């Protein structure tokens, strides 16, 4: 997509003059880093669909299998680096503190892109809201214990799985599974950001999973503008001022260039 495309210039000006911007991202923003999307052809692991493994029932039935899958996902993601879209978004957030990234991704790549620009402490003030949790946190299935966790998990047997240091129950990935509610405070903060945004830039999400997919509609209802970047049309394409039918690394850096 050429830099001189009129739609690019229009949206670049809009983003420059916005008082507050919400960026909603999905698996598509990380696809060019090598992270498989959910609904794309790479979404399967050993013939299991994510919907079969990412549930509390699956974890109760076979915690070893679910941890083995998460171990594989962590390994795949650990081999991936932020791409040009993550980097442009990180620079934009650092430059403009009224920008809030809200992501459905659990891969930590937005955070990594920020840490490439800032120290870990500085980056913590610009962190994305992770609506669906993180691959790199665990929580106890029984008590409120929750902690950052990057060590490899030994999923050779149930006895070797990580356990809660406070109550000795199993630790599970701190991600939102099918049928579970989002963390209330994170969702509230995302809704507040959506209500206050002049522009909601939506990148690489199929926009079929709610409440995440409703956030751009909140911005729209409050009088803001929705802009979409996606290889394919989505349910949000019709409400978007512009829907760029191109890849995240191609368009996002152009839209956010100074
Ligand atoms: P999906 O896999 O549903 O959708 C990925 C979207 O990214 C699709 O619309 C693709 O067209 C688009 N896409 C792929 N590559 C792209 C690229 N290079 N540039 C731009 N767009 C690209 O992933 P999500 O929408 O993130 O939830 O899925 C939402 C949620 O569904 C996930 O967070 C997960 C799943 O259930 C939970 O696990 C709770």
Image (cartoon, helix red, strand yellow):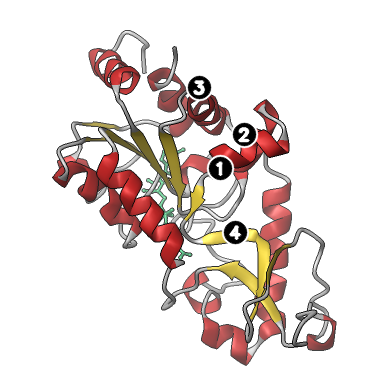
* Helix, strand or loop status at disc 3: helix
Q: Which residue is mark 4?
A: 134
Residue 29: which numbered mark, if any?
none
Q: Position of residue 68 (x, y in %)?
A: 72, 73
Using the rendered view, name the quadrant where residue 143 is placed. bottom right
- What percent of the width, then of the height, locates residue 200? 30, 37
Looking at the image, residue 225 lies above or below residue 139? above
Residue 55 falls left or right of residue 14: right
Which residue does the numbered mark 2 point to in the structure image? Answer: 114
Residue 45 found in image quarter = bottom right
Residue at (28, 40) in percent of width and height:
196
Q: Residue furthest top?
A: 4
| 62 sits left or right of 105 in the view | right
Q: CA distance from mark 3 to mark 1?
A: 13 Å
* N-terminal label among 1 and 4: 1
Q: For the residues marked 1 and 4, what is the alpha-carbon distance in whole angstroms? A: 13 Å
In this figure, which residue is indicated by the disc labeled 1?
Answer: 127
Choose the circle earlier in sequence order: 3 or 4.
3
Q: For this rendering, which residue is in front, 169 or 27?
A: 169
Q: At numbered mark 4, what does the secondary structure look like: helix, strand or loop?
A: strand
Q: Earlier in the sequence, mark 2 or mark 3?
A: 3
Front: mark 1 or 4: 1
Which of pointers 4 and 2 lies earlier in the amino acid sequence? 2
Tell me where residue 16 appears, x and y as whole percent: 34, 18
Q: Which mark is residue 95?
A: 3
């Amino acid at each position: 997509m050429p830099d001189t495309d009129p739609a690019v210039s229009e949206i670049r000006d809009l983003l420059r003059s916005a008082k507050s911007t919400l960026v909603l991202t999905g698996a598509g923003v990380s696809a060019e880093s090598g992270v498989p999307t959910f609904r794309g052809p790479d979404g399967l692991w050993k013939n299991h669909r994510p919907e079969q493994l990412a549930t509390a029932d699956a974890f109760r039935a076979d915690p070893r299998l679910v941890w083995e899958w998460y171990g594989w996902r962590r390994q795949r993601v650990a081999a991936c680096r932020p791409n040009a879209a993550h980097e442009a978004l990180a620079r934009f957030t650092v430059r403009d503190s009224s920008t809030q990234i809200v992501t459905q991704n659990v891969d930590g790549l937005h955070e990594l892109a920020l840490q490439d620009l800032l120290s870990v402490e500085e980056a913590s003030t610009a962190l994305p809201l992770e609506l669906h949790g993180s691959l790199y946190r665990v929580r106890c299935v029984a008590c409120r214990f929750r902690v950052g966790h990057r060590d490899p998990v030994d999923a050779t047997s149930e006895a070797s799985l990580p356990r809660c240091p406070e109550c000795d129950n199993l630790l599970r990935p701190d991600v939102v599974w099918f049928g579970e509610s989002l963390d209330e405070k994170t969702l509230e903060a995302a809704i507040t950001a959506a209500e206050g945004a002049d522009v909601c830039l939506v990148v690489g999400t199929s926009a079929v999973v709610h409440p995440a997919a409703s956030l751009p509609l909140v911005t729209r209802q409050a009088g803001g503008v929705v802009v979409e970047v996606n290889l394919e049309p989505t349910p949000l394409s019709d409400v978007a001022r512009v829907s760029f039918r191109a890849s995240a690394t191609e368009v996002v850096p152009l839209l956010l260039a100074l």
